[in-house]
Image (cartoon, helix red, strand yellow):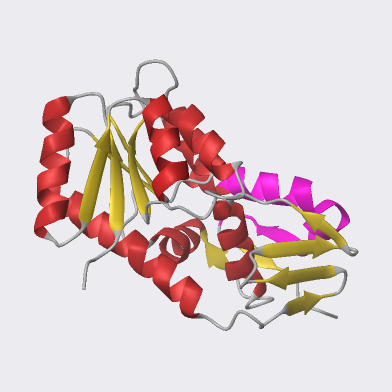
Amino acid sequence: MAKETILVVDDEEDILELVRYNLSREGYQVIGETTGEGALKRCRSEMPDLVVLDLMLPGIDGLEVAKNLKGDERTRQIPIVMLTAKEEEADVVTGLELGADDYITKPFSPRILTARVKAVIRRKDQAQASDENQEIRYRDLIIRPGQRAVLVQGEPVELTFTEFQVLHYLVQRPGWVFTRSQIVDAVHGDNYPVTDRSVDVQIVGLRKKLGACGEYIQTVRGVGYRFKELE
């Protein structure tokens, strides 16, 4: 049985072929594009199971591609692994805010790339296999994991993929205090190389979007975050 289809987007042909070769060895069906425009067209026509996306692309860059994919109902559930030479924190945070699932900086180890891709696909499969009818209610907040839907006082709230993952993780154990590292590990897998600031950015975005319910996410100074317990 054929494995998942992965779209690799990179304007450097040698990098594209390196990634294609290593993922193909694992049994994945690999397709490639060298431009952001081509990536968007291919995603909408073939709906790959995952996208390995370079940020430095001619024309439409990788961040704009990610923004377009996550803003389109048809493609927003496609996981994205960013592949980039840019190591600045701002680029990583921006990518995560847009809904990217993981990132790898060049130069990279093919073994690490393959492991990250496997981990992202595994998390996607686990989420799809969960009980889609299980609804979480917390006062004026309703979370429907199967639909990846959030309602505040009956009104839908649009969250990025990562924001939803963080919210879902915290709300399952009200009162428990989680460090930033624990949140990162739960959402992105073990040893995910991300900064504390990126977790803080997700929390700030969540609180703002949740409005009155944003106060349910509490900061525990010097430790991390927790979801407020019902009194």
Q: Quadrant of residue 19?
A: top left
Question: 20 above or below 155?
Answer: above
Is 18 on the left or on the right of 122, as rendered?
left
Q: Point out the residue furthest to the front here.
A: 45
> Is most of the magenta stretch helix, strand or loop?
helix
Q: Position of residue 92 (x, y in %)?
A: 43, 36
- Between 176 and 95, which is closer to the camera in this rendering? 95
Query: How many marks do you count on the picture?
Result: 0
Is 216 in the magenta?
yes
Q: Seen in the image, is 74 located left or right of residue 114?
A: right
Who's the residue at 85% across and 80% down the image?
Answer: 231
Q: Residue at x 49, y 43 (%)?
A: 96
Is residue 133 on the magenta stretch? no
Q: Residue furthest right?
A: 153
Percent across and percent down for residue 223 are: 55, 59
Viewer-closest of 7 and 100: 7
State whether residue 109 appears in this view: no
Residue 154 higher or lower than 210, as above or below: below
Q: Specify start and end residues of the magenta stretch as a single range.
A: 200-222
Quadrant position of the N terminus in the picture:
bottom left
Figure quadrant of residue 5: bottom left
What residue appears at the point 69 percent right and 76 percent down from the top-left corner?
174
Instruction: Look at the image and tell me whether residue 45 can be seen.
Output: yes
Q: Is residue 200 left or right of residue 56?
A: right
Q: Position of residue 20 (x, y in %)?
A: 16, 44
Q: Position of residue 154 (x, y in %)?
A: 89, 64
Q: Nearer the viewer, residue 14 or 218?
A: 14
Residue at x-position 81% and y-position 68%: 141
**Considering only vertical position in the picture, is 105 above or below 25?**
above
